[in-house]
Amino acid sequence: MLKESLRLDKKLRAYYDKHERLLVPGLLVAGFIFDLITFQIMSMKSTMQFLGAYAILAALALIYQNIFDGRRSPSKWAILRYLRALSPYVIQLTFGALLSSSLLFYWYSGSLSVSWPLLALVTGVMISSELFRQYYLKPITLFGVYTFLLLSYFAILLPFVMHSINGWIFIISGAMSTFIVLLLITCLAQLAEHIERQKKLMYVVVMGVFVLMNVLYFLNIIPPLPLSIREAGIYNQIIRDGNLFTLVGEDESFWQGLVPGQIVHANLDEGVYAYTSIFAPAEVRTTIYHNWEYKNLDTGKWEERGVLNFKIRGGRPEGYRGYTMKSQLEYGKWRVTVANERGQVLGRVIFTLVAP
């Protein structure tokens, strides 16, 4: 019986080694597709619960895999060897789901022009799993990636729990994720010799992820989680009747809508409206700022022409809607930068004002 189970274990490992090139990125993509579906049909609360389950399952798979690999003699229990053979699949599937949660959040936010650094980072991690898979599957790399995933999850979860969005929430998210991963590494080092040998370097990697993410966050290179733009645009007129907003703007064809930047026709004495729909966690109240800027063609620089704001409260899935109006404009290129109270940019709307 033991010989048969060992043969089956070898077959599973041989299958994984043979198809590793497709399995690793394939399972990451599978996690992405699952998130793509659930994000559209599930409530935010249920989504947070699913992501939490992914994080726990990924941790359990990492723990089990490294404890098993740290054994000095092969296990006599077939089920334990089968679980070890399955653990890489579980890790890649859960990693894919957790990675895509951040990517999808910003993809749906409509603030791609600002959130591209984070999207590029997440996409790069997914692509690197194929290009550098011999390094990606090593414990030191997996725990580094898991630190990033856990930080991203807490950065989305804590604002929902604490009803607040500020820099301290992000710092707490990073501290919690770093503490959990360092604790896992410390405990595993007592049970697995290969973890003990790499422990100090793994500490450096985990702390490096924490420092890097905080630098990117506080330099406003990555936008604040989980505040995001659902919809944004420039309109000639906005009529509000209770919760109903009537937006009057330019007629655009499908192809024109794909080109960045809007053409807005208006007289100089007429007002132009910047409309944004902002998603925020339930019970969160904050202020959104619209910074109106005009591009000086002589200097090539953007010149501030007014900062207007409005209050929002979170909880509405489609986002909390608000707008600002600017009159006495000049013909030419304009942009409205949408930011939070800390000055972190959520997105930008660019338009060109021309005569009717």
Image (spheres, rainbow, N blue to C red):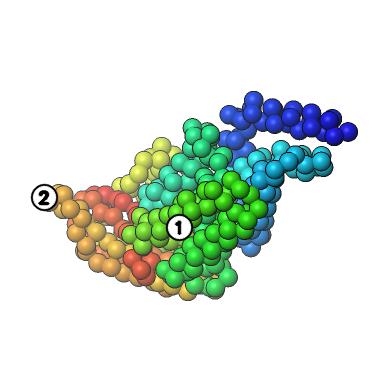
Kind of residue at disc 2 = Asp
Is residue 65 in view? no
- Name the image quarter holding residue 68: top right
Residue found farthest to the right: 1
Type of amino acid under label 1? Met
Quick check: can you spot residue 53? yes
User: Are dots 1 and 2 in contact, CB under 8 Å?
Assistant: no
* Mark 2 residue element: loop
Q: Which secondary structure lies at badge 1?
A: helix
x then y, percent, for residue 188: 62, 54
Q: Residue at x 58, y 61 (%)?
A: 183
Packing grade of label 1 (10 A; few <14, some 14-19, many >=20) is some
> Compared with residue 326, is residue 188 higher up or lower down, i.e. above or below?
above
Residue furthest toward the left?
A: 298
Image coordinates for residue 36, horizontal then vertical, percent: 60, 46
- Where is residue 100? Give x, y as percent: 55, 47
Above or below, 135 against 353 in this view is above
Per the image, the residue denoted by label 1 is: 207
